[in-house]
Image (cartoon, rainbow, N blue to C red):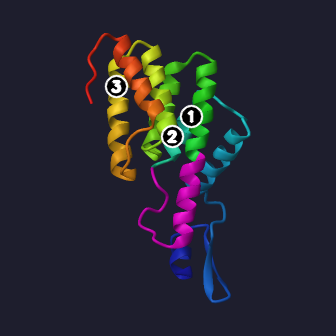
């Protein structure tokens, strides 16, 4: 492997450590390292804004090492997706405070892509759509949330979610379809 790395002029090295090996990246930057740094800075409320949101969503390509079934891979995957969702929630709050509801909505769509059974985030997205006069999208969110919660958890939606849906439907003069 070392010979192969040298022949391709890569700034990487392989070191033997105990019974295993470690790959030293040298000057190579790994996208997950950049993602983790941005997550840390955003969780500290540093650099909130549209460019941060765009960079984070460009870096987060989905679950980390989905084909890796090792415990460390699963733990890292859960940690990254949880931190990513939390950062998106903070960015959503930032966008709402700055009257940028379209970006707040986009943040919540990304959260629901990571945590599709998150009723709290689903309700917030429904509220944003409803407040913006887009009740049909709010209803679509409800129906998707209902499917995801049933499929993943095999339970019905929380009363608060159903009540919000009913308020949205009744305020639009529409009939209740479930």
What residue did someone put label 1 on? 53
- Taking depth in this image into account, of 92 and 130 the one nearest to the observer is 130
Q: Residue furthest front?
A: 159
The span from disc 1 to disc 2 (Cα, nearest Å) is 6 Å
Proximity of marks 2 and 3: CB atoms separated by less than 8 Å: no
Please tell me whether mark 2 sits on a helix, a strand or a loop. Answer: helix
- Taking depth in this image into account, of 99 and 154 the one nearest to the observer is 154
Proximity of marks 1 and 2: CB atoms separated by less than 8 Å: yes
- Taking depth in this image into account, of 23 and 92 the one nearest to the observer is 92
Q: Is residue 101 visible?
A: yes
In the rendered structure, which segment of residues is drawn in magenta?
Answer: 62-83
Residue at 36 percent of width and 44 percent of height: 148
Which image quadrant for residue 72? Answer: bottom right
Say which mark, if any, is on residue 139: 3
The verdict on residue 69 being magenta is yes
Q: How many marks?
A: 3
Say which mark, if any, is on residue 115: none
Q: Is residue 85 above or below residue 25?
A: above
Circle nearer the viewer, 2 or 3: 3
Residue at 48 percent of width and 31 percent of height: 160
């Amino acid at each position: 492997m070392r010979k192969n790395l040298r022949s391709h002029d890569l700034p990487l090295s392989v070191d033997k450590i105990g019974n295993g090996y470690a790959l030293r990246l040298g000057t190579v930057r790994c996208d997950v390292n950049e993602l983790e740094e941005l997550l840390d800075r955003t969780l500290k409320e540093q650099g909130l804004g549209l460019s941060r949101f765009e960079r984070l969503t460009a870096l987060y390509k989905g679950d980390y090492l989905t084909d890796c079934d090792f415990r460390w891979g699963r733990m890292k995957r859960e940690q990254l997706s949880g931190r990513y969702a939390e950062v998106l929630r903070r960015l959503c709050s930032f966008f709402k405070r700055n009257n940028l509801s379209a970006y707040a909505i986009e943040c919540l769509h990304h959260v629901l892509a990571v945590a599709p059974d998150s009723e709290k985030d689903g309700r917030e997205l429904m509220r944003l759509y409803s407040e913006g006069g887009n009740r049909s999208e709010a209803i679509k969110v409800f129906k998707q949330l209902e499917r995801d919660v049933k499929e993943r958890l095999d339970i019905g939606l929380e009363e608060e979610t159903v009540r919000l849906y009913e308020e949205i439907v009744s305020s639009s003069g529409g009939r209740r379809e479930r």
